Image (cartoon, rainbow, N blue to C red):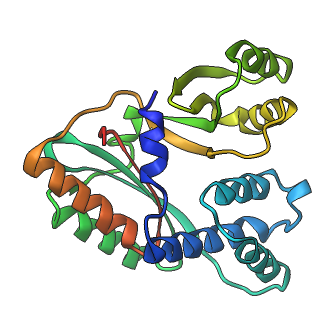
Amino acid sequence: MGRKWQNIKYGKAANDAARAKIYAKFGKEIYMVAKPNPDPDGNLALRAIIEKAKTYNVKQDIIDRAINKAKSGVDESYDHNRYEGYGPNGSALIVDCLTDNANRTAAEVKTAFGKNGGNLGVPGSVSFMFTSAAVFGIEVLDEEKVLDAMIENDADISDIEVEDDVMMIYGSSEDHHKMETALKSLGVSEFKVNEISMIPNDTITLEGDDLARFEKLIDVLEDLDDVQEVYHNVEL
């Protein structure tokens, strides 16, 4: 499936500026998911995004602030928009956004692609090259015990990979909660990765100028305030 989940999502947050950006993105998403029901026990989507936020070391007060904002009745509305396109040398990207101004976001994403060796495509132009999956990264456990726990919880697993001290487990996105329950039944209390993601069916390798332009494109996209996630098919 992946190269230890792209080295645990590129280190997640290398500096204070990156962490601040991550906190802002999670704050917005937690607020939106919490609006219908701010109780994590009764809102599986909220529970899932909170668990994901914890793997990015988002502080509890930021999580609580977003939930309390939803409870307070503050009326902010954001739409989920997905953009698809190609980067340098046939690389494929999916960009998920949460925006209060779709025209602004579309223009910013299009400009990012155009200025960095890419082209924005139409819906469906690259998504067929990816599979929605639940992804977990944990400390290495006995694989047979993991499989048994998944079977007991009726969770559909597609792959298990072990590299260094990390076990990566991939399964159906619909079974995310079942997989999490299975792992917690084995005593797992902390996750290196815990999310639903878009996994490329195949990956490509870029070199030289193509790789430099691709990495610049990723940096520009991820720096946009409305961008929540960027998925791609490049081995980094």
* Count of marks, rendered view: 0
Whether residue 99 is visible, yes or no, is no
* Residue 135, placed above or below residue 151: below
Seen in the image, is 170 located left or right of residue 230?
Answer: right
Q: Write the residue at 31% across / 31% down.
A: 203
Residue shown at 76% from the left, 59% from the top:
46
**Viewer-proximal residue among 155 and 106:** 155
- In front here: 43 or 191? 191
Q: Tell me where residue 63 appears, x and y as whole percent.
A: 73, 71
Q: Residue 192 is drawn in which quadrant?
A: top right
Residue 106: % across, % down: 36, 70
Determine whether, in the image, residue 222 is placed left or right of residue 180: left
17 vs 25, left or right, is: left
Q: Quadrant of the C terminus?
A: top left
Name the residue nearer the viewer: 171 or 138: 138
Q: In this rendering, does residue 61 appear at all?
A: yes
Residue nearest the observer in this picture, 88 or 125:
88
Question: For residue 51, what is the image quadrant?
Answer: bottom right
Residue at 43 percent of width and 43 percent of height: 7
Taking the image as shown, residue 218 lies to the left or right of residue 54, namely left
Decide: is 51 above or below 15.
above
Where is 233 relative to 201, above or below? below
Q: Residue furthest left?
A: 209
Kindly identify the residue that appears in the image at 42 percent across and 42 percent down: 6
Residue 149: which quarter of the image?
Answer: top right
232 to 47, vertically: above or below: above
